[in-house]
Amino acid sequence: MIHPTAIIAPEAKLGDGVEVGAYAIIDADVEIGDRCRILPQAQILRGCRLGQENTIGRGAILGGDPQDLSFESATSSQLILGKGNTIREHVTLHRSATAGQATIIGDANFLMVGAHIGHDSKIGDRNVLANNCLLAGHVEVGSNCFLGGGSGYHQFLRVGDYVMAQGNGSFSKDLPPFTTAALYNQIIGLNSIGLRRAGYSTEERRELKQLFTLFFRSGSNRATALESVTNQNWGAPAKKLIEFLGGASTKGVCSMKLRISKKNTAKI
C-alpha cells in the first residue's frame, strides 16, 4: 500500500490500511489514521494529525507554515483533521501560528481543487468548499455550509451553520447561520432550500423566517431587535441564530441591502 518512491520519516505513525502514493512526502511528528489514502505527490508535514478514512489529493500540502511574517518555523504547532474528509488536488491547509495550538478541521468535509484554509481556523463538519475558496487565518466555519468557488473570507471571520455563499463573493464580516450571501458582505436571503433538505420542520423554518425579517429586512437596530426577542420561547435553530447575532464579533455582521422601489428612486 506504500509506493517505493514515497518519502516517509521513520518517526511518522501510520495506521492500518494506509495507502501512500508515488512521491508523497510524510514528515516526522505526523500521525495518520486507519484507511487513509495519501495520493501521489501529496505532502503531510510535521504537526499533522489525521483521523480515519481521509483522502488527500495529488499535490495537496497539509501542515504548511502559516503565512504570517512574524512566524518562526521552529514553532511547534498542529493541524488536526477529523475523519472521512476529501481533500482534493493542490489544497493547502496551514498549521497554527501559535505554539501548542492547532488549526482544526472536523469530519466529512469536501475541499475542492485549490481551496485554502489559513492558520488557526476552526472548521466544523460536512462543509463543501468549492474550487479556490480562500479562508484567511482564524476563520471559524460551522457545519453544513457551501462556500462557492473563488470566494474569499477575511481573518477572524465567523460563518454560521448552513450558510450558502455565492462563488467569487468577498466577505470581511460575519455570515449568520441559515443565510445565503453574495457579492461583498451582502446577505441576500434565508437558505430555505437548504433548511428543507436538512429536515427542519415547518415551525422551525417559520421562526427563522420571522427572525430573518426582523434582523435583516425591517431596518430595526440590531441591538434593539435582540433585546426584543431574548426572553421569548424559541426552538433550537432560532436560538442558534439569536446567539450568533448576540455573540462576540471582531468584524461585525453582514447586512442585507434593502431594495429601493422605482417610485422612491425617482425622487432621489
Image: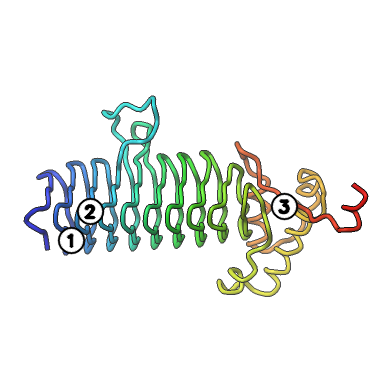
Quarter assignment of residue 21 = bottom left
Label 1 sits on a secondary structure element that is: loop
For the point 34% across and 34% down, which residue is it? 100
Q: Earlier in the sequence, mark 3 or mark 1?
A: 1
Residue position for label 1: 18
For the point 40% across and 61% down, which residue is it? 110
In the rendering, which numbered label is found on residue 32?
2
Residue 51 horizontal/vertical position (percent): 29, 56
Residue position for label 3: 256
Quarter assignment of residue 22 = bottom left
Q: Amino acid at mark 3?
A: Met
* Residue 183 left/right relative to 9: right
Q: Quadrant of the N terminus?
A: bottom left
For the point 32% across and 36% down, which residue is it? 65
Work out whether 150 lies above or below 28.
below
Asked if the residue at tag 1 contacts the one at tag 2, i.e. Cβ–Cβ closer than 8 Å, the answer is yes
Residue ranking furthest to the right:
267
